[in-house]
């Protein structure tokens, strides 16, 4: 689901509650900052999957963190996880972070 589609869905279903936001990243733009400002997503943890790390020209997690200004996020926990959807490398680590984070927010 695209970011703008998700934003429309959030606005049209006020009863829905999100516990975590996962962003699969091949490229992302201005939509991320708009999405993070959405009222229903305040304090919802964010996992960014930096996909295509199996490619030589892939941006590093650090470059993506800088490009998306993730280091400026102060209202939620967040994690960037380098991964490859093709090789599955890094996917399990990201999902383990999700599991741990969701469990800790339920307390």
Image (cartoon, rainbow, N blue to C red):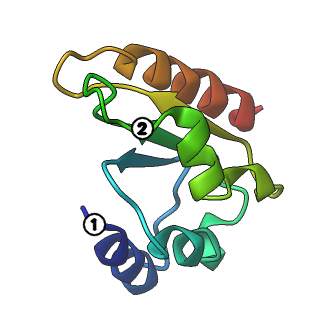
Is residue 46 visible to the viewer in this orientation of the structure?
A: no
Does 74 appear above or below 42?
above
Does 85 appear above or below 48?
above
State the image coordinates of residue 91 (x, y, percent, origin top left).
36, 21
As helix, strand or loop, the secondary structure at mark 2 comes to strand
Q: Earlier in the sequence, mark 1 or mark 2?
A: 1
Most extreme residue toward the left, as rendered? Answer: 86
- At x 72%, y 37%, the residue is 105
Q: Which residue is mark 2?
A: 50
- At x 34%, y 77%, the residue is 4
Q: Which quadrant of the figure has residue 50?
A: top left
Q: Nearer the viewer, mark 1 or mark 2?
A: 2
Q: Which residue is mark 1?
A: 2
Choose between 89 and 63: the one closer to the eye: 63
Choose between 7 and 86: the one closer to the eye: 86
**Horizontal arrangement in the rendering, residue 25 relative to residue 55 (left or right):** right
As helix, strand or loop, the secondary structure at mark 1 comes to loop
Distance from disc 1 to disc 2, alpha carbons, whole Å, reads 16 Å
**Horizontal arrangement in the rendering, residue 44 relative to residue 32 (left or right):** right
State the image coordinates of residue 20 (x, y, percent, origin top left).
54, 46
Is residue 106 visible to the viewer in this orientation of the structure?
A: yes
**Horizontal arrangement in the rendering, residue 21 relative to residue 24 (left or right):** right
- At x 79%, y 57%, the residue is 72
Q: Which quadrant of the figure has residue 34?
A: bottom right
State the image coordinates of residue 62 (x, y, percent, origin top left).
61, 36
């Amino acid at each position: 689901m695209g970011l703008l589609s998700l934003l429309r869905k959030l606005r049209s279903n006020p009863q829905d509650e999100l516990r975590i936001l996962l962003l699969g990243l091949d490229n992302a733009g201005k939509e991320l900052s708009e999405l993070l400002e959405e009222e229903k997503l305040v304090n919802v943890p964010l996992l960014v999957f930096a996909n295509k790390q199996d490619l030589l020209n892939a941006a590093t997690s650090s470059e993506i963190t800088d490009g998306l200004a993730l280091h400026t996020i102060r209202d939620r926990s967040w994690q960037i996880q380098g991964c490859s959807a093709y090789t599955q490398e890094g996917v399990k680590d990201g999902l383990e972070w999700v599991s741990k984070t969701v469990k800790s927010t339920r307390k």
